[in-house]
Amino acid sequence: MDRRTFLSGASIAAATVATACSQGQEGEVASPNVQTRRTRRLRMVTTWPANFPGLGTAADRVAEFCNTMSNGSLEVEVFAAGEIVGAFEAFDAVATGTADMYHAAEYYWQGKSPAFNFFTAVPFGMTATEIMAWVDFGGGQELWEELGREFGVVAFQAGNSGHQMGGWFKREINTLEDFRGLRMRIPGLGGNILRELGGAAVALSGGEIYPALQNGTIDATEWVGPWNDLAFGFYREAPYYYGPGFHEPGSALGLGINAGVWDGLDADHQAIIRAACRACNNMALGEYTHQNAIALNVLLNDHGVQLRSFSDEAWDRIGEIAEQVVADVANADPLSRRVYDSYIAARPRGPQVHRRVGPQPHPLRRHHRVVVGRVVDRFRSRA
Ligand code: CA
């Protein structure tokens, strides 16, 4: 239908409605023949505690937007970790149809494929705006869909924590030797780096971290950033707060949907879910940026937290290890190789204006030293 045909068709429809209204019986409002739409109910499982600031609330917000924008023809119901399935079972629940969608961080599925790491964050990798650029405009979304469909899931960005902090330490980290023997809660590829430094990476879900820090099972932990870390109270057990982190420079959250459910949705419902994810993606980054600043002041001024940053020596050594750890992902399988290649190729398209000039060994390392280096400088000026 071309535009003119559409317009004339719309005019006829409008005229018909007007006639029908004018011919209605007294006291009655005749209405056009609108077919009642069946409500599409979707169950969303998450990897977060109920209403957890920034993470759980991002999932709630996606659902709320879907339900409102669809005028109730979508009804997305959110379940916290453990209500239907445990946090790390969310992916399988959606893939098998036990639930329709999940809100999570894709690197939790690295046991399925290490390529999932790239759709959350990798050490010395992309910042929040850079991963948005790559996924939406640099070919990332297409690769993500190819990867997800291997398991029966289609996923989109639906939140971002921004640059995460390096974590909480009971003792200061002055030299690389101080990482040796360090027992630290740090997930994913960041954990691989700690092992290379001679430390022991421990995997714990959010709720398990504080007791482990308290009873000495671990010496250090990362979680997210000031807003979320203040909520867990880590400052009471580990006074040295290092930032920024090397392991998660801009962690994306993801909304995954069962591929069959997604393919069966009406086009407007698909568009509404996509729009809700995009809106929540942007809002989460703004909210984290806003709340982190407030929470960091509370930590420093009210709780006497000692702010620190890793030394240049540590950054350089960690950068070398990060290159290798991230590159190793590409060796897992052909699709992981293509995701890695796309990610690395997209990196130099970042904000060139912020980059220093000079020979650098690897795109990831060059990126981190320049873009993230500015964050380090900012933190140091406050410490
Ligand atoms: Ca983290």
Image (cartoon, rainbow, N blue to C red):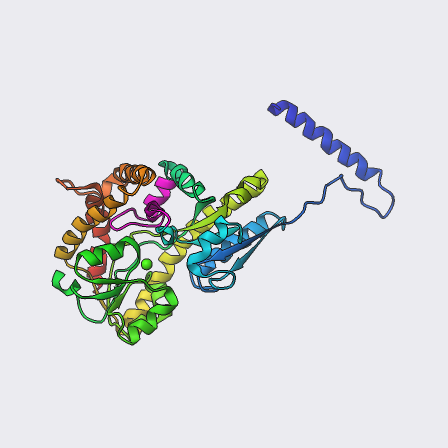
Q: Quarter of the image holding residue 169?
A: bottom left
Quadrant housing the N terminus: top right
Q: What span is colored magenta in the figure?
A: 112-135
Residue 309 among magenta residues: no
Left or right: residue 66 compared with residue 26 = left
Instruction: State whether residue 182 is above or below residue 259.
Output: below
Residue 175 in view in this figure? no
Picture coordinates of residue 288, whole percent (x, y): 38, 58
Q: Residue at x 15, y 40 (%)?
A: 357
In front of the other: 25 or 89: 89
In front of the other: 1 or 166: 166
Residue 101 in view in this figure? yes
Q: Residue at x 80, y 42 (%)?
A: 30
Instruction: State whether residue 231 is above or below residue 32.
Output: below
Figure label count:
0
Left or right: residue 73 compared with residue 98 = right
Picture coordinates of residue 350, whole percent (x, y): 28, 40
Q: Quarter of the image holding residue 246?
A: bottom left
Instruction: State whether residue 305 is above or below residue 154.
Output: below
Q: Quarter of the image holding residue 24?
A: top right
Left or right: residue 11 compared with residue 297 = right
Left or right: residue 297 compared with residue 267 = left
Quadrant housing the C terminus: bottom left
> In what quadrant does ligand 1 lie?
bottom left
Picture coordinates of residue 63, whole percent (x, y): 53, 54
Residue reaching furthest right? 26
Picture coordinates of residue 36, whole percent (x, y): 71, 45
Residue 132 among magenta residues: yes
